[in-house]
Image (cartoon, rainbow, N blue to C red):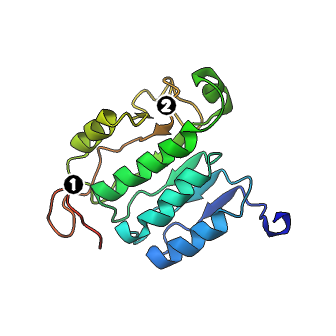
Amino acid sequence: AKQDELPFQEIDASQNQLGWRGCKTLVDLCLKCKDLRVVKLFKNELTDKAVPALCKLAEECPGLEQLHLSYNRLSGDGASQIIAAAARGRAGTKGDQKDRRDKGFTLWLRLEHNKIQRPAELLEGLWAKKVDFCEARDTQKCGPRICKRCALVHLPYFSKQDGEASDGKSASADSVQ
């Protein structure tokens, strides 16, 4: 209902030791913000238990411009699910690539410094599944709200990861913490 809507455009809960339960509560709050543009959850304690809530946010808020999840403890599998959900949520937006570029539909999704093993292989797997993303390596033509390719999701600095997942298994293994 309209009376339940919140006016926030940006929510910053970064550097708060936020875990998956707090993340779920925060996402519920985010989903009540009809004009939400930026969500900052970097430098928290988010593990793959937070992934269902983060996927819901990424998929159900197509107007979201930035989602900052760097410096958490997400695995490759968790990151893949979030990226795919973000692409699904934006794929339903009306218009062609030019419309998307003009309206800034590309999500700036920061996932660097997580527990993602073999990030290059993970991205190759997403390409194989036809997930539309850009690594934003051209800093002149790619940034928040703009993408030279008009991709659905930007993954800047994705290759910068903190190494091994806590269970030491590959990124494709089920590593729900």
The residue labelled by disc 2 is 151
N-term-proximal mark, 2 vs 1: 2
Quadrant position of the N terminus in the picture: bottom right
Tell me the element at label 1: loop
Task: Report whether 68 appears left or right of 145.
Answer: left
> What residue type is disc 2 on?
Ala
Q: Residue furthest right?
A: 3
Using the rendered image of the protein, determine whether residue 156 is visible from the camera's viewpoint: yes
- Asked if 127 appears above or below 47 in the picture, the reply is above
Label 2 packing within 10 angstroms: few (<14), some (14-19), many (20+): many
> What residue type is disc 1 on?
Ser
Task: Report whether 148 appears left or right of 28.
Answer: left
Label 1 packing within 10 angstroms: few (<14), some (14-19), many (20+): some
The residue labelled by disc 1 is 172
Task: Report whether 162 appears left or right of 103.
Answer: left
**Disc 2 to disc 1, how far (Cα)?**
25 Å
Tell me the element at label 2: loop
Task: Report whether 6 appears left or right of 151.
Answer: right
Looking at the image, which residue is at 39% across and 53% down?
Answer: 81
